[in-house]
Image (cartoon, rainbow, N blue to C red):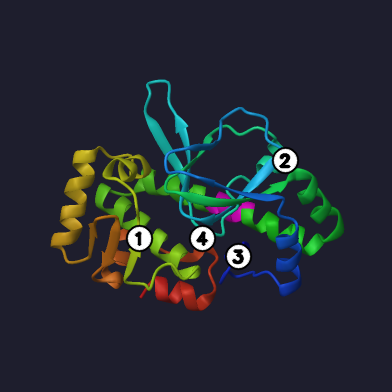
Amino acid sequence: MLTRNVLRLRNTELSDAERDTLESSISFTRTYAAGQIVVRQGSPVEVSTLLVEGLMTRHVDAVDGKRHLVAMHVPGDFVDLHAYVLKRLDHDVGALTDVKIALFTHAALKQIQVEDATLARRLWFLTLLDAAMHRQWIYRLASLTAVERVAHFLCETNARLLAIGASDGAEFALPMTQADLGQVCALTNVHVNRVLRELREAQLCEVRASRVRILNLKELVRVAKFDPAYLYLAPEIASRACA
């Protein structure tokens, strides 16, 4: 099912009937190549995007030309569910890797809202979860050191991928460049390189060839000051995410 990863192993999960309803509400699917813009800032929007395969980002291009990643999305995320209400986005949505997406017209989402109040609340939960992650990203940039920022992002990504079976808790794919990591953590490429070397030399994790290998998750979590509570994961996944 295209919706198999939506709210998978979260505190609140879809029932089989709700998942069937959501699945039947998909209007069409599309694929995009890495680097393509899927939704442009300011453009009128009449559909919302569910990420099925690959990784996507939300980003803002500053007036000085610098790009700032403000979110990264994994399969099962509704990338722009908030567009159902807003109709225009204040940021771009792009494909970080080759992606497959499922699209829901806003008319279909309105039908869900009218006919299935419980499923509508589940979708609302997704937007609130998205907001919770935004708050953590702000906290990470405002309060953590460079090493802590990168470690926190890696712990968060591991936890999110654990929930959808894309990490075994020790290794996962992360096809991001050092420039991408720098945008996430507000660091220069040189600084990211230095931090990754420090994490590797401390025997905490290795980031090589678009893969992350965690060598000591418990210590990485401690260094990152990472608490997965804001991800609202099922208890067993939250426990694994913290070793």
Mark 4 residue type: Tyr
State which tag comes first along the sequence, 4 or 3: 3
Q: Nearer the viewer, residue 97 or 13?
A: 97
> Is disc 3 surrounded by few (<14), some (14 to 19) or many (20+) residues within 10 Å?
many
| Nearer to me, 28 or 158 | 28
Q: Of label 4 and label 2, which has the lower sequence position?
A: 2
Q: Is residue 99 magenta?
A: no
* Lower position in the chain sequence, tag 4 or tag 1: 1
Q: Image height check: is 89 above or below 221?
A: above
| Residue range (magenta) | 127-132
Residue wearing tag 4: 230
Which corner quadrant holds the N terminus? bottom right
Q: Badge 2 local density, few (<14 within 10 Å), some, or many (20+)?
A: few
Q: Is residue 129 magenta?
A: yes
The Cα–Cα distance between marks 3 and 1, rounded to whole angstroms, is: 21 Å
Residue 198 in the image, given as x and y percentages of width and height = 16, 55
Q: Quadrant of the C terminus?
A: bottom left
Which residue does the numbered mark 1 point to in the structure image?
173
The amino acid beneath tag 1 is Ala
Q: From the viewer's perspective, tell me whether residue 185 is left or right of residue 216.
A: right
Residue at 75 percent of width and 56 percent of height: 25
Pointer 2: what residue? 85
Question: What secondary structure is marked by label 3?
Answer: loop
Label 3–label 2 contact, CB within 8 A:
no
Question: Residue 7 bears which disc, if any?
Answer: 3
